Image (cartoon, helix red, strand yellow):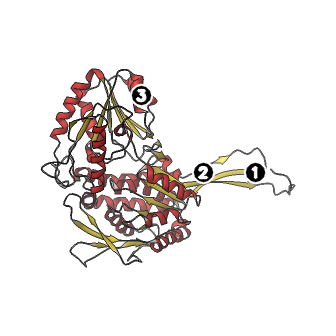
């Protein structure tokens, strides 16, 4: 997997079950966002590498993997789950070095990878069709759920392994093959997973990884006519471009895009619980998560006291080395994201928002460390209330009546997630039903599980990851008609 031609490890592409050098012969360095120094060299793929990977994935569909039963697929998935359990600590460290996310979070995510495999392995041998009653006595009709084919999985830098597994587990259960294109900022974890896929004994070509620093390889992958479906997690702008490119050759898409999620706090909420939940929703992972609760929609009666307590907690957050379990917030993942965050805050202030705390790079740590930021006096028509920052920035908006809170929550193009904080469960359920979001937590936030559907609508994308129906995102349904009588019928008449 790695070479020793320099003082940092050099990785190769994983295509058709083998480690291969890129056609270009070129590599690029990926940086550790905490140290700011290179920590790995990875290949710069081109269209030829993409074609080789898609060809390998297609060949696997036509070979042993395509002929495998659901029981056989499930066995390999469980074997891989065991390997990932064994290596969870190593994978967590790779994730943290790649994107600066806290080791306490990447450790939990790495340990959870096996849960997705175990769950969907349990679905692989239960992909049942159905017998459909016929209006004709001489026909039996039944359905089959068959793999859609080769899937291009394009994953972002914020939770690379987790978001890859959300795609990989159901598509393997469905019988698909995959070409993975990780973010140029965090390519190593996908290559580390490839090594373990090979150890688990998956047939060659089932799992392939191409890496590239530029966008050309990803564009070539999406546009490749051998790709039957694209599963993408990232920004709405890139998602729209991918959908258009995939549609040009009638490939399906599953898009998990951005969010501008509201945390609605009613006057009767448990204040400490709600404060903790808001902290979790926006400052965990440095705000670099699609479900970030980046809008606090707070009842006017408790706004001032709540924001004071929230500010106290935000100012106590410990920033530092993400590999230390004492750290509570790490750096932003890259310089581009820092620049984006700074720009959003600057424009918010120009629009009339007030910086309650934060709003700057950390004086002591510098680099990519941005202080937890709370902005007050925000209205829902401001950019900061409408656009995804993907950083530790919370916009505070207030309401007086329930319908106003719902209108604010629904007043964006996004519809991914929301939180509702109240001790009145009638209010909680009522608001959860009214809010336009694919995922709503009541008196909690940012909790996921392999058996619970995840996804959004509008600018947050379409399709669902996780949950039993996620497998059907990667299947096509075939109807089979069986004529039972053997009688000759009129060839010029339908039915």
Residue 129, numbered label: 2
Residue 406, numbered label: 3
Q: Can residue 408 be seen in the rendering of this structure?
A: yes
* Residue 356 falls left or right of residue 161: left
Tags 3 and 1 in contact by the CB under 8 Å rule? Answer: no
Give above or below for 482 relative to 377: below
Return the disc, 3 or 2, that comes first in the chain's sequence.
Answer: 2
The Cα–Cα distance between marks 3 and 2, rounded to whole angstroms, is 40 Å
Task: Provide the residue designation for mark 1.
Answer: 139
Return the disc, 3 or 1, that comes first in the chain's sequence.
Answer: 1
As helix, strand or loop, the secondary structure at mark 2 comes to loop
Give above or below for 200 relative to 365: below
The Cα–Cα distance between marks 2 and 1, rounded to whole angstroms, is 17 Å
Q: Residue at x 27, y 50 (%)?
A: 108
- Point out the residue furthest to the left here: 364
Q: Of tags 3 and 2, which is closer to the observer?
A: 3
As helix, strand or loop, the secondary structure at mark 1 comes to strand
Closer to us: 149 or 371: 371
Near mark 3 (Cα within 10 A), the count class, few <14, some 14-19 or many ≥20, is some
Q: Quadrant of residue 394?
A: top left
Q: Residue at x 73, y 45 (%)?
A: 134
Return the disc, 2 or 1, that comes first in the chain's sequence.
Answer: 2
The Cα–Cα distance between marks 3 and 1, rounded to whole angstroms, is 52 Å
């Amino acid at each position: 997997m790695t070479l020793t031609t320099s003082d940092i490890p050099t990785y190769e592409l994983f295509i058709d079950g083998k480690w291969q050098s890129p056609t270009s012969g070129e590599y690029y360095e990926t940086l550790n966002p905490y140290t700011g120094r290179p920590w790995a060299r990875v290949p710069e793929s081109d269209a030829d590498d993409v074609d080789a990977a898609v060809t390998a994935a297609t060949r696997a569909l036509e070979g042993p993997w395509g002929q495998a039963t659901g029981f056989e697929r499930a066995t390999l998935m469980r074997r891989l789950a065991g390997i990932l359990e064994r290596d969870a600590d190593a994978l967590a460290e790779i994730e943290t070095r790649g994107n600066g996310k806290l080791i306490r979070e990447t450790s939990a995510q790495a340990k959870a990878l096996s849960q997705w495999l175990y769950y969907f392995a349990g679905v692989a041998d239960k992909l049942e069709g159905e017998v459909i009653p016929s209006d004709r006595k001489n026909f039996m009709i039944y359905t089959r759920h068959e793999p859609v084919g080769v899937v291009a999985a394009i994953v972002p830098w914020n939770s690379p392994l987790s978001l890859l597994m959300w795609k990989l587990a159901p598509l393997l259960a469905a019988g698909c093959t995959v070409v993975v294109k990780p973010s140029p900022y965090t390519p190593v974890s996908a290559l580390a997973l490839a090594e373990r896929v090979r150890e688990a004994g998956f047939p060659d070509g089932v799992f392939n990884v191409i890496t590239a620093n530029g966008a050309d390889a990803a564009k070539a992958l999406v546009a490749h006519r051998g790709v039957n479906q694209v599963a993408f997690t990232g920004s709405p702008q890139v998602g729209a471009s991918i959908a258009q490119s995939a549609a040009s050759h009638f490939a399906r898409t599953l898009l998990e895009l951005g969010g501008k999620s509201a945390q609605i706090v009613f006057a009767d909420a448990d204040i400490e619980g709600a404060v903790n939940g808001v902290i979790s929703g926006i400052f965990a992972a440095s705000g670099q998560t699609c479900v970030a609760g980046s809008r606090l929609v707070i009842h006017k009666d408790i706004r001032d006291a709540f924001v004071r307590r929230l500010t106290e907690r935000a100012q106590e957050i410990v920033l530092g080395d993400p590999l230390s379990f004492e750290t509570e917030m790490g750096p932003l993942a890259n310089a581009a994201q820092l620049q984006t965050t700074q720009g959003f805050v600057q424009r918010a202030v120009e629009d009339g928002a007030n910086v309650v705390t934060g709003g700057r790079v950390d004086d002591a740590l510098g680099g990519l460390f941005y202080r937890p930021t709370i902005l007050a006096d925000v209205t829902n028509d401001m950019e900061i209330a409408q656009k995804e920052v993907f950083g530790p920035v919370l916009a505070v908006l207030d309401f007086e009546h329930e319908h106003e809170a719902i209108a604010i929550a629904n007043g964006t193009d996004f519809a991914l997630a929301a939180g509702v904080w109240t001790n009145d469960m009638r209010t909680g359920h009522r608001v959860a039903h009214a809010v336009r979001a694919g995922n709503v937590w009541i008196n909690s936030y940012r909790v996921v599980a392999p058996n619970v559907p995840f996804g959004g609508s509008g600018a947050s994308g379409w399709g669902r990851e996780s949950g039993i129906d996620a497998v059907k995102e990667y299947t096509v349904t075939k109807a089979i008609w069986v004529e039972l009588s053997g009688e000759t019928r009129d060839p010029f008449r339908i039915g």
